[in-house]
Amino acid sequence: MAKILMIDDDRDLVDATRIVLESKGYQVFAAYNRSEGQKAVQTLKPDLILLDVMMEMEDDGFVLAQDLRRQGVNTPIIMLTNIGKVLGMEFGRDDEMAPVNEFTEKPLEPRKLLALVQKYVG
């Protein structure tokens, strides 16, 4: 089954997401900040990345997505974030700022999360 890497500093959300995804047979790995996420992408070679925006710095997810794409990492990235709610601004997928496959607000109900994951890794 597919390997999914979740990069998010919210450990409770990571745990809840892990339960949902593992119940469907996915292998779920976690990193809790940008540097851990960078290393995990290189070592695990995940099939899908679930990425938060705001971690130690408000733009960590954006920076990590940009870095990964510059390094030639083509792994699908689903950005799960609440940055729009926090900052009161609208964000979305953008080839320069947010070079991700999907950009969605969290929390995401389990069936929507599974539908997004299945779209990229079956």
Image (cartoon, rainbow, N blue to C red):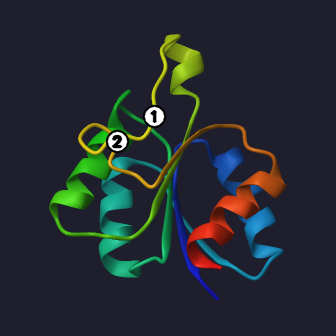
Between 9 and 46, which is closer to the camera in this rendering?
A: 46
The residue carrying mark 2 is: 98
Which image quadrant is residue 41 in?
A: bottom left
Residue 92 — which label?
Answer: 1
Secondary structure at badge 1 equals loop
Residue found farthest to the top: 88
Crowd tier of the residue under label 1, counting other residues whose Cα lies within 10 Å: few below 14, some 14–19, many 20 or above? some
Secondary structure at badge 2 equals loop
Quadrant the N terminus occupies: bottom right
Quadrant the C terminus occupies: bottom right
- Residue 50 spot, x, y in % from top left: 53, 57
**Amino acid type at image mark 2:** Ala
Eyeballing the image, is 11 above or below 118? above
Q: Is residue 92 left or right of residue 85?
A: left
Q: Is residue 38 left or right of residue 104?
A: left
**Amino acid type at image mark 1:** Gly
- Residue 67 spot, x, y in % from top left: 21, 53
Image point 38% across, 69% down: which residue?
40
- Residue 118 spot, x, y in % from top left: 67, 71
Q: Is residue 1 left or right of residue 32?
A: right
Label whose residue precedes the other's in the sequence (2 or 1): 1
- Residue 88 spot, x, y in % from top left: 53, 10
Eyeballing the image, is 31 above or below 80? below
| Disc 2 to disc 1, C-alpha distance | 7 Å
Residue 57 — which label?
Answer: none
